[in-house]
C-alpha cells in the first residue's frame, strides 16, 4: 500500500508533488497574463509546455520549451524556463474573451507527462484603465467627437486613436505627444486633457466609408490599453422647399443639408440665373426653416417691394411741359 502512493503521485496530472501553479487567473480583454509554474529540481532539463483543453488527454499543446532557458514564442504566447529557479513562465498577450478556458502547465517525460490545471478568465475590455462610448454616429460631411476617460496614473502617457476590426491589426490614425497639445492628421485630431483625465478625438468631413470599428488607446510598455468604439456614418438629411412668387418667371428652390447646415438658394428667371449659399450655425430643422424664410424675405420679397415702389415713383414723377419754351416771348423781337 505504501509503495503505491509515490507511484500514484507520479502518474496523476496536476500532482502538487512534482509541479505546481496557480489554480485561477483573471485578466481583462486586450491585456496580458503571466503564469508561473514551479517544478521539482529533478525535471530541470526536461521540456516544459503550455496547453489548452478541459480534459487532460485531448489537451492541445500551444507552446513547448526546447529543454533550455531560451524563450519560445508563437503568435501571442511565449514560454521561458528558468532552470536555476526551477520555474517556467507562460505569457499570453492581446487577450480576447474567447481565450477564457482551462489550461495546463506541463512537463514532458517518458510515460505520462506531469501537469497542473490553470483556469483562465478573460473579462470585458479594460474598463478599469480606460473607458469610452460603445457606439458613436455622425452624418456625411459632418463631424463627430469621441471622449475617452482613463485612470489618472496614465496621465503623461501617449494616447492614440486607431481603426481596425481586430486589435492586433489596428491602424493608428493619430497619437498625442504625451502633453495637452492638440495633434491633427488629415481630418482627425486628438487632444489630451490631463487635468480631467480624458482625451478627445474629433473626426471632420465624414464620409460613408468612415463607418467601422475604432479604438481609444494608451501607449505603454508591454501591451497597450484600449477600448472599442463602433462608428456609424449615415447619409446627410436634405430638406427642399420651393417658393412661388407673384411673378411666374421667378422661383426660389431652397435646399437644406442638416449635416453641414448649408443653405443653397438657386434663383431662376427670364433674365437671371444664379444661386446663393449661406452657412447656418443652427443644427435643428426648425431653426433652418426660419433661416430659409428670412433668406426668402431678404432676397425675394424686399427686392420685389422695392421694384414695385420704384415703378410707382417712376409713373408718378413730375412731368415738365414741352410747350413752355414755345409760349415764352422772344426778348430779341421786343
Image (cartoon, helix red, strand yellow):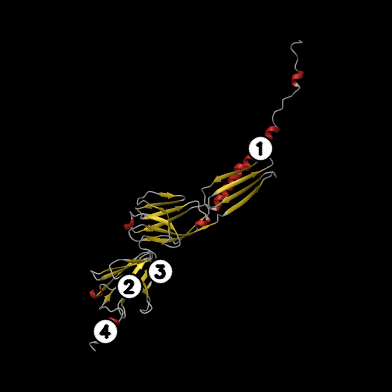
Q: Which of pointers 2 and 1 indicates the residue nearer the eye?
A: 2
Q: Circle 2: is it few (<14), some (14-19), or many (20+) Cα within 10 Å?
A: many
Mark 1 or mark 2, which is nearer the start of the sequence? 2
- The tag on residue 159 is none
Q: Are marks 2 and 4 in contact (CB under 8 Å)?
A: no
Q: Circle 1: is it few (<14), some (14-19), or many (20+) Cα within 10 Å?
A: few
Q: Are marks 2 and 1 in contact (CB under 8 Å)?
A: no
Q: Is residue 56 left or right of residue 317?
A: left
Q: Is mark 2 on a helix, strand or loop?
A: strand
The image position of residue 198, as x and y in percent, is 38, 55
Q: Circle 3: is it few (<14), some (14-19), or many (20+) Cα within 10 Å?
A: some
The image position of residue 331, as x and y in percent, is 74, 12
Mark 4 or mark 1, which is nearer the start of the sequence? 4
Residue occupied by mark 2: 49
Q: Distance between the residues labelled 2 and 1?
A: 93 Å
Q: Are marks 3 and 2 in contact (CB under 8 Å)?
A: no
Q: Distance between the residues labelled 1 and 4?
A: 112 Å
Residue occupied by mark 3: 97
Q: Circle 4: is it few (<14), some (14-19), or many (20+) Cα within 10 Å?
A: few
Residue occupied by mark 4: 7
The image position of residue 250, as x and y in percent, is 67, 44
Mark 4 or mark 2, which is nearer the start of the sequence? 4
133 in relation to 332, above or below: below
Amino acid at each position: 500500500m505504501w509503495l503505491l502512493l509515490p507511484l500514484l503521485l507520479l502518474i496523476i496530472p496536476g500532482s502538487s508533488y512534482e509541479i505546481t501553479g496557480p489554480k485561477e487567473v483573471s485578466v481583462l480583454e486586450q491585456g496580458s497574463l503571466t503564469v508561473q509554474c514551479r517544478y521539482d529540481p529533478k525535471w530541470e532539463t526536461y521540456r516544459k509546455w503550455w496547453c489548452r483543453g478541459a480534459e487532460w488527454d485531448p489537451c492541445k499543446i500551444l507552446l513547448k520549451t526546447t529543454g533550455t532557458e531560451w524563450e519560445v514564442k508563437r503568435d501571442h504566447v511565449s514560454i521561458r524556463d528558468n532552470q536555476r529557479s526551477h520555474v517556467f513562465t507562460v505569457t499570453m498577450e492581446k487577450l480576447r474573451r474567447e481565450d477564457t478556458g482551462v489550461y495546463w502547465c506541463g512537463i514532458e517525460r517518458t510515460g505520462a507527462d506531469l501537469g497542473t490545471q490553470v483556469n483562465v478568465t478573460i473579462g470585458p475590455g479594460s474598463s478599469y484603465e480606460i473607458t469610452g462610448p460603445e457606439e458613436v454616429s455622425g452624418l456625411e460631411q459632418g463631424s463627430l467627437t469621441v471622449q475617452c476617460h482613463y485612470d489618472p496614473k496614465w496621465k503623461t502617457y501617449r494616447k492614440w486613436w486607431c481603426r481596425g476590426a481586430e486589435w492586433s491589426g489596428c491602424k493608428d490614425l493619430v497619437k498625442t505627444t504625451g502633453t495637452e497639445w492638440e495633434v491633427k492628421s488629415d481630418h482627425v485630431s486628438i487632444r489630451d486633457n490631463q487635468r480631467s483625465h480624458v482625451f478627445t478625438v474629433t473626426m471632420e468631413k465624414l464620409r460613408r466609408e468612415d463607418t467601422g470599428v475604432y479604438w481609444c488607446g494608451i501607449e505603454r510598455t508591454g501591451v497597450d490599453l484600449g477600448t472599442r468604439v463602433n462608428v456609424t456614418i449615415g447619409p446627410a438629411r436634405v430638406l427642399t422647399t420651393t417658393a412661388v412668387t407673384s411673378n411666374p418667371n421667378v422661383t426660389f428652390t431652397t435646399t437644406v443639408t442638416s449635416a453641414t447646415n448649408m443653405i443653397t438658394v438657386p434663383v431662376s428667371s427670364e433674365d437671371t440665373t444664379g444661386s446663393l449659399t449661406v452657412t447656418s450655425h443652427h443644427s435643428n430643422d426648425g431653426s433652418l426653416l426660419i433661416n430659409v424664410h428670412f433668406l426668402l424675405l431678404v432676397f425675394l420679397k424686399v427686392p420685389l417691394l422695392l421694384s414695385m415702389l420704384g415703378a410707382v415713383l417712376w409713373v408718378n414723377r413730375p412731368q415738365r411741359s414741352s410747350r413752355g419754351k414755345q409760349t415764352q416771348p422772344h426778348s430779341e423781337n421786343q
